Structures are given as structure tokens and as C-alpha cells.
């Protein structure tokens, strides 16, 4: 059986944390407009913090951006006296714009994403005909994580895991005993992320999910989204490996890769594209920076017709 050194390292980090290491504190801010959960995680010993998957508010009718969601995160960070070490993105989101550069301007923190963002930049750079001014080398970010790379949040150990499938570049960030798993699994009663965006792959998503579900059962999982579910009208963004293995409607223990891929492919064919995919991808492929202004000083979002 092949060993998975990065997974094993993450599993032993989680076990050590649960056995008495410092437990990271997580506070979540939920954006009901995009159903996105932004997590602020910090080390209570050093008060170092990471902001994960922040939201820049955007109204597609007017083209107006706002910082209401990010300002709520900022107010919490300041009130708690946190020192922001990281602005983490689990992936290039297609359903909301990232506020990471704006937050970085306010409170700092290294902007980081998975190293395979360069693939996403290549694909969407072509779709949006972004030209040579748009670098497709990940240089918009301060750090590009590879699978198994370690980092720290104050006194707490952390490790990045590559979990592709929803997009080619998705990462999960395991910080102490808490895993921030982006768009892979959602709550057990909702299921899993779609796998039909450019570069997505349902079989790959299945294998990434099984890898996450081979972490210790008590691992805390923090999700990037919740959409509610039949019989549940409140939003939830935290679960555990055990709960997902027992009850995830798409991928509980016993579901084969073939069955998952058939389900996922059938379901994805029925889904509309996210309402904000055009602005989101153009901004997030640039690390959350808006496109450069044109000669009149105005920034524009493009809409390729009959392409996506
Ligand atoms: Fe996503």
C-alpha cells in the first residue's frame, strides 16, 4: 500500500493537538449573499491569526464593490488584538470575490494559495483574454503551497494538503486539530462540491475527499460554504471527519468512486453557473486584485459571450 507522507504528517499533528497541544480558536463570519464562511483562526498563546477565504461584497447590477463583510472581520481582529500572519485562500473561488488584498492592506498577513493556481491562471487568462500584463506564475501571491508543506500559526503547527477536484488547485489547511477544507465536502446533509468547472474532475475530488476522511475521526472540519439543506433552515460550517464518514449523503463510507462520479456528473449537469462567476474568477485569478484601470481610470469586468 503506498504511503501518503503528507496525510500521515497531518494526522499526527491533529492527534498531538488533541492530546493537549494548543487548540486554535476559530471564529466564523458567514456571508448570506454568497453562502460563504470566512474563518478567522488564531493561536490563543501568541494571538497570531490567519484569515481564510474572505469576501469582497459585489453587486453585479451596479458593478459596486463594498467592504461590509471584510470590515466585520477586521473589527473582530482588532477587538481581539490579533496579529494577522496569513491571508489564506483555499482556492480561486468562482462564487465570490476575495477581500484578501484589502484586508492585507489593513492588517497585513502573507497571501497564500495552492501552487497549482498557475494552472487556473493559465485557463482563465485565456478565457478572459487577459493579455501579457496578467502574469500566470502565481506572483500575485506571497506564498504558493505544495502538498505537505508545513507552516506555523504562532505556536501551532500547520500543514497544507493538496485536495484537487473542485478545481485543480484546491488546498486544505490543517492548523492544529482544525482542518479548513474549502470546497471539497460540505455539511453531511448537503454533500460535496461540484466538479465541473474548467480543470475540475469528479474522480479526483473523490480521491481528495477520501484522503481528508482518512484523518482522525475527531478532526474538526471547517467548510467554505453552507447552503442549508432540506429540514434545516440555519447555516452550519463546522463538522467532523466521523460525522462526514457516517452521514455525508454523497460520500459516506461505502460509496465507491464510480458511484460518486456518476452521481456528481449527473448532478453537475443540472447546476447553473454561480451568479458571480465572471467577476469572481477575473478578480481571484489576480489574487483578489481588481483588473487594472483602463485609460479613463475605470476598472472593467469582462463577460465572454457563448464561452462558459
Ligand atoms: Fe469554490
Image: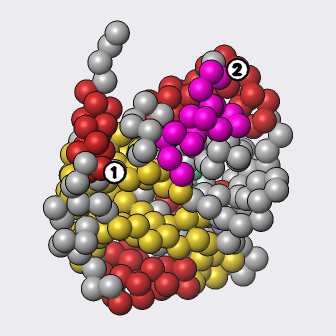
User: In the displayed image of the protein, which residue is found farthest to the top?
Assistant: 1
Q: Quadrant of residue 65?
A: bottom right
Residue 79 sits in quarter: bottom left
Q: Is residue 253 left or right of residue 116?
A: right
Residue visible at 62% across and 61% down in the picture = 236
The secondary structure type at the circle numbered 1 is loop
> Is residue 85 depicted above or below 225 in this figure?
below
Give the structural element (helix, strand or loop) at label 2.
helix
Residue 115: x and y in percent read 34, 43
Asked if residue 110 shows in the view, the reply is no
Does residue 292 lie above or below 134 as drawn?
Answer: below
Colouring of the image: secondary structure
Picture quadrant where residue 278 is located: bottom right
CB of residue at label 1: within 8 Å of ligand 1? no
Along the line of sight, the residue nearer the viewer: 58 or 127: 58
Residue bearing the label numbered 1: 177
Quadrant, the C terminus: top right
Q: Position of residue 214 (x, y in %)?
A: 43, 30
Choose between 169 and 135: the one closer to the eye: 169
Query: In this view of the protein, can residue 5 be seen by the observer?
Result: yes
Question: Residue, x 71% and y 67% (percent of image)?
Answer: 234
Mark 1 to mark 2 CA distance (whole Å): 30 Å
Name the residue located 71 percent from the left edge and 46 percent from the top edge. Answer: 189
Q: Which residues are magenta?
A: 239-255
What residue is shown with label 2? 259
Is 246 placed above or below 308 here?
above
Q: In the figure, 240 relative to 284: above or below?
A: above
Residue nearest the viewer, comparing 295 with 285: 285
The x, y position of residue 281, in whole percent, is 56, 56
Label 1, residues with CA under 10 Å away: few <14, some 14-19, many ≥20: many
Residue 250 forms part of the magenta stretch: yes
Amino acid at each position: 500500500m503506498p504511503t501518503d507522507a503528507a496525510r500521515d504528517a497531518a494526522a499526527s499533528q491533529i492527534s498531538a493537538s488533541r492530546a493537549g497541544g494548543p487548540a486554535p480558536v476559530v471564529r466564523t463570519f458567514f456571508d448570506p449573499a454568497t453562502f460563504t464562511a470566512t474563518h478567522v483562526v488564531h493561536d490563543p498563546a501568541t494571538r497570531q491569526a490567519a484569515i481564510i477565504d474572505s469576501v469582497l461584497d459585489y453587486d453585479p447590477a451596479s458593478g459596486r464593490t463594498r467592504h461590509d463583510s471584510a470590515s466585520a472581520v477586521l473589527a473582530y481582529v482588532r477587538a481581539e488584538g490579533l496579529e494577522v500572519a496569513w491571508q489564506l485562500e483555499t482556492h480561486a473561488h468562482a462564487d465570490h470575490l476575495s477581500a484578501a488584498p484589502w484586508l492585507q492592506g489593513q492588517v497585513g498577513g502573507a497571501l497564500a494559495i495552492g501552487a497549482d493556481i498557475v494552472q487556473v491562471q493559465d485557463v482563465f487568462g485565456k478565457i478572459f483574454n487577459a493579455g501579457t500584463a496578467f502574469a500566470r506564475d502565481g506572483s500575485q501571491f506571497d506564498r504558493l503551497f505544495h502538498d505537505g508543506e508545513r507552516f506555523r500559526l504562532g505556536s501551532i503547527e500547520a500543514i497544507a494538503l493538496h485536495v484537487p477536484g473542485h478545481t485543480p488547485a484546491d488546498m486544505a489547511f490543517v492548523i492544529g486539530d482544525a482542518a479548513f477544507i474549502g470546497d471539497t465536502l460540505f455539511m453531511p446533509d448537503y454533500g460535496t462540491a461540484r466538479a465541473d468547472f474548467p480543470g475540475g474532475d469528479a474522480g479526483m475530488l473523490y480521491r481528495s475527499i477520501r484522503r481528508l476522511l482518512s484523518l482522525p475521526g475527531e478532526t474538526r472540519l471547517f467548510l467554505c460554504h453552507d447552503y442549508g439543506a432540506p429540514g434545516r433552515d440555519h447555516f452550519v460550517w463546522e463538522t467532523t471527519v466521523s460525522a462526514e464518514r457516517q452521514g455525508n449523503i454523497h460520500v459516506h463510507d461505502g460509496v465507491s468512486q464510480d458511484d460518486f462520479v456518476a452521481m456528481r456528473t449527473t448532478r453537475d449537469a443540472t447546476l447553473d453557473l454561480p451568479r458571480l462567476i465572471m467577476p469572481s474568477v477575473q478578480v481571484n485569478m489576480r489574487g483578489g486584485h481588481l483588473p487594472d484601470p483602463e485609460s479613463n481610470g475605470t476598472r472593467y469586468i469582462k463577460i465572454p459571450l457563448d464561452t462558459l
